[in-house]
């Protein structure tokens, strides 16, 4: 969908980030592997603390990440991770935050101070990630967020130890808007999740639709809570009747919103942001409502990515096969957890150390192709998947099918 101008912009941005990364890496100094991890000078492990939504709101996403992290750790541990003169095993310390920000912040403190982890990851919901951020920043431990909200990594001056993997809302909206316009749609309603993820979506989609001369007739926020009644918000968003509705949220709430749209009589088209792509959205209960809906998501969701024979493509294929072998089917959201762990391991390899400060420096200078897509981290940018990693998918016969 992106034209030559977009491709040139992407390449120039990567060039700028690469130059900035090279400058900082050159200043990182000599190998300090002998210092080892915090409080574990003789450890032969790379310890990663994980706070995930394994129950409660966000469970549909958190369970996928736990699976992905364990699969990836097991693969690394087949041979160990070379870090300086040592070969370390990866050890995950996983906690269930149940979707509660307070608990996620407590986990970050305990994992850092008591478990002496070298890095943190998790927080599939924006609220849990935002609760972890001040702890990670204060204790100076690298944290890779798995949530979608633009303010996770900005302002950068207050987020020097913070990174995120999910696409920026701007890039998702800039892919959605031309898709909507190409289908002759001129009037759109928006149902956005409460909180930071929804805030990002409202801002980004408003600007993107305006740029393609599509009218956003109404933006309505969905209520919070697992058992919230979506009918009032849905009726408000679909009156007067728009030609399409964008649901900007995360599973399981995205599927519930689509189901409510159909139950209240809405017959127009439905579009999702990347947060909707989880097994729950295609559940038997949601299937009739989401059939024919569109979503913007990293291209790794498509089966065509499994034919790629580049090193990244082979890693992706291996991960998908391992995931299916263990869990029966593959979920498109799962690779984020795998990429978070791979980035931490790569930082340890490159920095020849598990020192938290060096891990942060080398995390912030990685330009790499992951399982889910491409990342370009640099001192001037700590988050967001590259826009050219995104694709458009539609639900066809109960599964995601690549459109473009």
Image (cartoon, rainbow, N blue to C red):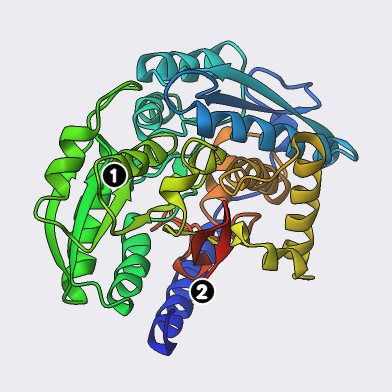
- Which label was assigned to residue 261? 1
Mark nearer the N terminus (1 vs 2): 1
Q: Quadrant of residue 45?
A: top right
Horizontal side, residue 6 vs residue 24: left or right:
left
**Coordinates of residue 298 in the picture (x, y in percent):** 53, 59
Question: What number of labels is visible?
Answer: 2
Q: Which residue lies at the image location 62% right of the left edge and 20% below the top edge?
A: 94
Q: Nearer the viewer, residue 222 or 22?
A: 222
Report the Cα–Cα distance between label 1 and label 2. Answer: 26 Å
**Coordinates of residue 57 in the picture (x, y in percent):** 42, 24
Q: Nearer the viewer, residue 168 or 255?
A: 255
**Coordinates of residue 7 in the picture (x, y in percent):** 46, 82
Q: Which residue lies at the image location 71% right of the left edge and 29% below the top edge?
A: 36
Q: Nearer the viewer, residue 237 or 9?
A: 237
Q: Which residue lies at the image location 41% right of the left edge and 26% below the top edge?
A: 132
Question: Is 226 above or below relative to 4?
Answer: above
Q: Is residue 83 visible?
A: no
- Secondary structure state at the residue bearing disc 2: loop
């Amino acid at each position: 969908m992106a034209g030559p101008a977009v491709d040139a912009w992407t390449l120039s941005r990567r060039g700028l980030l690469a130059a900035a990364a090279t400058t900082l890496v050159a200043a990182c100094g000599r190998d300090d592997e002998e210092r080892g991890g915090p409080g574990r000078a003789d450890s032969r492990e790379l310890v990663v603390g994980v706070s995930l939504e394994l129950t409660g709101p966000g469970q549909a996403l958190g369970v996928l990440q736990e699976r992905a992290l364990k699969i990836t750790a097991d693969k690394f541990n087949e041979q160990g991770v070379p870090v300086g003169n040592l070969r370390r095993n990866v050890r995950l310390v996983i906690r269930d935050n149940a979707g509660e920000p307070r608990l996620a912040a407590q986990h970050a403190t305990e994992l850092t101070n008591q478990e002496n982890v070298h890095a943190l990851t998790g927080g599939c919901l924006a609220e849990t990630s935002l609760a972890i951020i001040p702890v990670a920043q204060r204790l100076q431990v690298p944290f890779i967020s798995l949530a979608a909200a633009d303010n996770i990594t900005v302002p950068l001056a207050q987020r020097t130890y913070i990174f995120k993997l999910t696409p920026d809302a701007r890039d998702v909206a800039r892919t959605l808007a031309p898709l909507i316009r190409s289908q002759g749609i001129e009037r759109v309603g928006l149902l956005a999740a409460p909180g930071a993820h929804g805030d990002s979506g409202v801002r980004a989609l408003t600007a993107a639709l305006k740029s393609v001369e599509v009218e956003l007739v109404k933006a309505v926020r969905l209520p919070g809570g697992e058992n919230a009644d979506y009918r009032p918000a849905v009726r408000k968003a679909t009156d007067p009747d728009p030609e399409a509705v964008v649901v900007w949220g995360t599973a399981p709430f995205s599927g519930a919103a689509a189901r409510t749209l159909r139950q209240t009589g809405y017959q127009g088209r439905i579009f999702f942001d990347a947060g909707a792509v989880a097994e729950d959205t295609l559940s038997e209960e949601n299937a009739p409502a989401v059939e024919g809906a569109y979503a913007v998501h990293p291209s790794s969701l498509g089966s065509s990515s499994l034919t790629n024979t580049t090193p990244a493509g082979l890693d992706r294929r291996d991960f998908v096969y391992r995931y299916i072998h263990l869990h029966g089917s593959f979920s498109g959201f799962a690779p984020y957890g795998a990429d978070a762990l791979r980035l931490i391991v790569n930082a340890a390899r490159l920095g020849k150390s598990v020192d938290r400060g060096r891990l942060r420096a080398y995390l912030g200078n990685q330009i790499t192709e992951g399982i889910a897509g491409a990342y370009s981290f640099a001192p001037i940018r700590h988050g967001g998947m590259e826009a050219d990693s995104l694709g458009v998918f539609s639900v066809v016969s109960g599964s995601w099918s690549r459109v473009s």
